[in-house]
Image: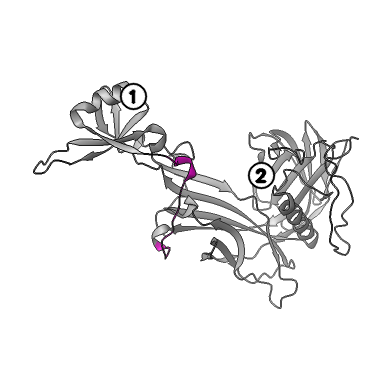
Amino acid sequence: MKKLLFLITTIFLFSCEEPYTPVIDVRDNSPIAIIDAFIDVSGNSIVHLSHSVPLTSDTSAIPITKADFLLESDQGLALEFSTQSPTGEHVLPHGALSPTAKYKLTVQTNLGSFESEWIEAYTSSDIKDVKLVRTDLGMEVHVSSEENQDKSRFYRWQIEETWRFNSFFVSRFIFKNGSVFRRTDEENISHCYAQNFASDIAIATTENLERNEITDQVIQFVPNMSDKLGIRYSVLVKQYSISKASFVFWNTLKKNSESVGDLFGSMPSELQGNFTSKGNMPVLGWVDAGLPAKKRVHFSAVGIDPPWAFETPFYKGCTSDIILIPDAPTLFGYNPQLVPMDELYLFENNGEPTHYSYTTKVCATCTNLGTTTTPIFWSEND
């Protein structure tokens, strides 16, 4: 087996925790399979597959796009799946599973075959509240949960962010067939939605607390000047109850990723996880199982006090100008990179528009950063 990219000194996950400073052999560039999986007993499990890059690489982990899966339980379940995903996020479409069973996941890829240990399923308590808390550096997303009657006292969260934003300039008019017309909803290029699946590891434990409940746990951070909170922001919070072994794994991975700035991209120390390789391809991965809690919350910028200031570096340098309406067809006809924005009334005692404001198409288009398609879950009601 080729030496691993970052196999230097063994971290003993389940022994005493001591400060650790890894020695990195930058000559060792062998890839490592990365598996982040959750067996959702309510249905449709998700497995993220990728492989690592060298510590010296400028890129992040590379998705594994094709895989076969075998999901087994100690109660006789055996489900097979073959999936493809350009992003490496593989969905295993199954119905509800037994919350009392133990599970094992086998993953077959072009890099090799990997098998997990048998794992127990845990049921998460309900999420009580998700709120925004302002700090000097930005906005924190806090979560609180009901008291958990399950035996687990360890938690992990995953966050899906969606936000509505506009291009730097909004184009309400379009030039077509030699004339300027008001845009229809289908011709919108300036109002968009963007999405982010947060990669930061959010974990916590109530092991040393009297009550097994989470209060105001920070699970995401939005820095000052981010456009996420500029108009409207939505977060889907997924809360998982996990085992102590899982907590130790994610806590160690969190410390390692913070030291190099890239979760799962390149790691400075060995971390085995609960997957083993059936061949020569090394693997770093973890699978949990259980019934998660989910809660989606929308936040409007009008509810943020003081108002949220933001900028979008992509649009730096954007400017606009004006053109007389009779001259507009010539300008836009010879300059397809320009788009009209609004009608202007610049002559006194004239009830008709006299000019169009205009800008470059790049400055009035938001689809370079998102999509004009409204998500099915989107709501304008708080």
Residue 17: x percent and y percent? 85, 63
Residue 338: x percent and y percent? 34, 29
User: What residue did someone put label 1 on?
Assistant: 335
- Taking the spot 87% from the left edge, 38% from the top edge, the residue there is 278
Q: Amino acid at mark 2?
A: His
- Tell which circle, 1 or 2, labels the residue nearer the N-terminal end: 2
Q: Tell me where residue 79 sits by quadrant.
A: top right
Q: Amino acid at mark 1?
A: Asn
Q: Nearer the viewer, residue 366 or 114?
A: 366
Residue 233: x percent and y percent? 47, 54
User: What residue did someone put label 2 on?
Assistant: 94
Quadrant (top left, top right, bottom left, bottom right) of the C terminus: bottom left
Q: Nearer the viewer, residue 104 or 284?
A: 284
How many marks the image carries: the answer is 2
Q: Nearer the viewer, residue 104 or 63?
A: 63
Could you say whether the residue bearing mark 1 is in a helix, strand or loop? loop
Prevailing secondary structure of the magenta residues: loop
Quadrant (top left, top right, bottom left, bottom right) of the N terminus: top right
Q: What span is in magenta?
A: 303-317
Answer whether residue 326 is magenta in the image.
Answer: no
